[in-house]
Image (cartoon, helix red, strand yellow):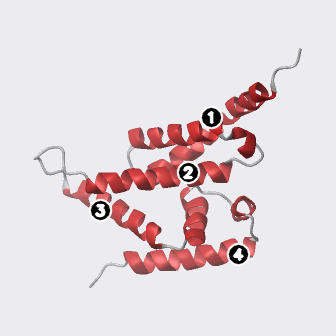
Amino acid sequence: MAEPEERVGTTDFESRFEELFDLAYRVGFRVLGVQDEARDVAQEACARAERRWSRLAESPHGWVVRVAANLAIGVQRKRARRPPEDATPPARDVDEFAAERVDLVRALGHLPRRQREVVILRYLADRPEAEVAETLGCSVGTVKTHASRGLAALRKSLEPTA
């Protein structure tokens, strides 16, 4: 007797889980810089992917990257609003690193949606232009345009003020 269709889809997800988890983890770590938080983001992104697997099975990479990026940005925003847990000030280089990440998340949040998606997929998830184009349903030229404009906007907003 054949297995129910739902089980077959789950098996396909299980065979691709490690690849999707690694991709989501990389995005989470690049945004957050903390392994535990990046693992949490990757786990949540994969859990959401499994729930929607019947709709994602063809091309889940872009969706997982976007979800992981959005989750990581949410964690970063919560972290920025949270008061410090201890009275001991952290080392200066850690402060600078965290401040740079907060600035990056803030700058990404100000980009238009399509530019933000392209920058996240192309540079945070390290996906090739052709895959980004396929994921977003646009041409490679459109991806290049949005990447160029998005990076220019990020450079401008992250420039140190004199």
What amino acid type should be assigned to the residue bearing mark 1? Glu
Q: In the image, is 144 to the left or to the right of 110?
A: right
Residue 69: give x, y in percent of width and height: 51, 54
Residues at marks 4 and 3 touching, judged by CB atoms closer than 8 Å: no
Label 4, label 3: how far apart the Cα atoms are: 31 Å
Q: Residue at x 64, y 36 (%)?
A: 50
For label 4, the SS is helix
Label 4, label 2: how far apart the Cα atoms are: 22 Å
User: Would you name the residue on which mark 1 appears?
Assistant: 18
Label 1, label 3: how far apart the Cα atoms are: 31 Å
* N-term-proximal mark, 1 vs 4: 1
What amino acid type should be assigned to the residue bearing mark 4? Thr
* N-term-proximal mark, 2 vs 1: 1
Residue 14: give x, y in percent of width and height: 68, 29
Residues at marks 1 and 3 touching, judged by CB atoms closer than 8 Å: no
Figure quadrant of residue 149: bottom right
Q: In the image, is 153 to the left or to the right of 63?
A: left
Furthest residue in direction bottom, as rendered: 162
* N-term-proximal mark, 3 vs 2: 2
Q: Is 112 drawn above or below residue 67 in the view shown?
A: below
User: Would you name the residue on which mark 2 appears?
Assistant: 67
Q: Residue at x 74, y 64 (%)?
A: 137
Residue 85: give x, y in percent of width and height: 18, 44
User: Would you name the residue on which mark 4 appears?
Assistant: 142
* N-term-proximal mark, 4 vs 2: 2
Q: Residues within 10 Å of mark 4 (few under 14, many from 20)?
A: some
Label 3, label 2: how far apart the Cα atoms are: 23 Å
